[in-house]
Image (tube, coloured by chain):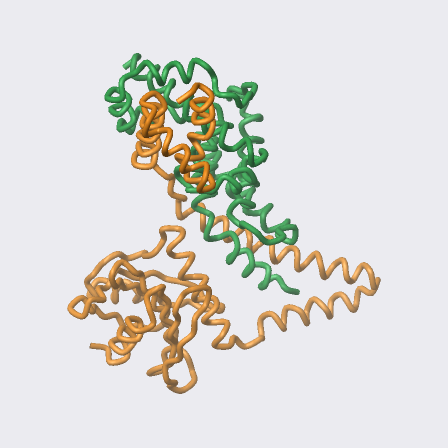
Amino acid sequence: MSHKADVKRFNELFVPHMNAAYNLARWLTGNDNAAHDVVQESALRAFRFMDRFAGGNARAWLLAIVRNQSYTWLKQSGNNRWINIGDEIAEDDIALSHTETPESHSIRSQDTALLHKALQELPPQFREVIILKELEEMAYKDIAIVADIPLGTVMSRLARARGMLKTELVKLYAHE
Amino acid sequence: MNEMHCDNCQKWLHGYLDNELDTTTATSIAEHLKSCPKCNQVYEGMRVLKAGIREHIPTYEMPSSLSRSVFAKIEAEAHSTMWDGLQNMTKHWGAPLFSAAAVAAAFLLYIATPSTQDEWVDEAVSDHVRSLMVGHLNDVISSDRHTVKPWFSGKLDFSPPVYDFTAQGYPLVGGRLDYLQHQNVAAISYMHNKHVINVFIAPVASTDSVPKNSSERGYNVIYWQQNRMRYVVVSDLNTGDLRIFTELLQKGM
């Protein structure tokens, strides 16, 4: 009869991370309504499976659920672009970052609308590591838990994500 | 610097950027960047990009309607699992009569258990955290007590005292209706140096009591009873400043 204790434990563990849950769901689905559903379902799952949380980082644990729910939605909605992931840094990304001038790059990196669009254009596996690192300020070990990849892959995934983001910025800038 | 070193530098660059490398590796990267314009240009580009993202990419705020529905769902789920638990127990014992009695007893226990000070404090802290997390601090936003106080009339069967301590450094921010320990309460918020202070007020039958301190999950709580009202003050403000605020509230001036 410990439902009060359960709710209390849920409040202590996961309520402080609800905003992070919504932010990740919103960035991954790109859609208010979907983020709404994903957060509700994730909170319910976190509550139901709270017994399996064996300590550690509650935020990473919750966000891992949110990520799974977001991917389920993405698959069902069918409008995403799935790509094969090789984590080696693409040669053209490196080449590109060598050719452009620091000034032009700096201007593009300060353009909010352009950055926003470029990030939303990245495949979800790359978008999520940037969100987790820069917006949620998570450590590599926690990003590994959320994104379900080995710790050693986090750095190369981020490297590739940033390279792709730069390429995307150049592309979008050229089209403006 | 040889090519090998540049390859290594490229490999570890992002770990360096994110402050995730051990000191030895970080130092050798820093050394290399000083002497290699090519790698340094890549690094600078990534540094600018990282700073740009942090500065310009928005964090989506969870709508308060969503947080309310999440909390409602969790409460509902908690109740339904308690119900299931009882049903399983009775199935196991196979005694329908016992079942009815157990359910009735459970609900009586749940409803009739008098709430203690601890429970008030505990729930008030949860509520304080929630009010900050969900961006639903106030239903009536005003620093004018002549706006906040009348807002409560008709919504509560008591009139909570509302003050403005702007001159003393604790300006009034607003008020909202809240629900603590199965009753409607007034939640009135004040600010002090960017710290939110929530004051929960509810009528109480028992006599006055002197303020007590408590600390819960990193929040300071001061609670007392005065003029047949229960006060629970919650904030992440330090105890000293919170005590000064409490004294102002008690004097009501």
Q: State the residue lying farthest toward the right.
A: B94
The answer to whether any part of residue B216 appears in the image is yes
Q: Nearer the viewer, residue B209 or A103?
A: A103
Residue A32 place in picture, x, y as percent: 43, 34
Q: Is B62 situated above or below B104?
A: above
Q: Nearer the viewer, residue B246 or B154?
A: B246
Residue at position x 28%, y 71% from top? B241
Residue B113 place in picture, x, y as percent: 58, 75
Residue at position x 24%, y 80% from top? B251
Task: Quadrant for the N terminus of chain A, please.
Answer: bottom right
In the rendered structure, the answer to whether residue B34 lies left or right of residue B252 reads right
Residue B58 place in picture, x, y as percent: 34, 36
Question: Chain A hue?
Answer: green
Task: Quadrant for the C terminus of chain A, please.
Answer: top left
Q: How many marks?
A: 0
Residue at position x 27%, y 64% from top? B190
Q: State the residue lying farthest toward the bottom.
A: B207
Q: State the residue lying farthest toward the left.
A: B167
Question: Chain B hue?
Answer: orange
Residue B175 place in picture, x, y as percent: 30, 62
In the rendered structure, the answer to whether residue B199 lies left or right of residue A154 reads left
The answer to whether any part of residue A69 appears in the image is no
In the rendered structure, the answer to whether residue B56 lies left or right of residue A73 reads left
Q: Nearer the viewer, residue A3 or A162?
A: A162
Q: State the residue lying farthest toward the front.
A: B1
Q: Nearer the viewer, residue B17 or A72?
A: B17
Q: Is A56 situated above or below B190?
A: above
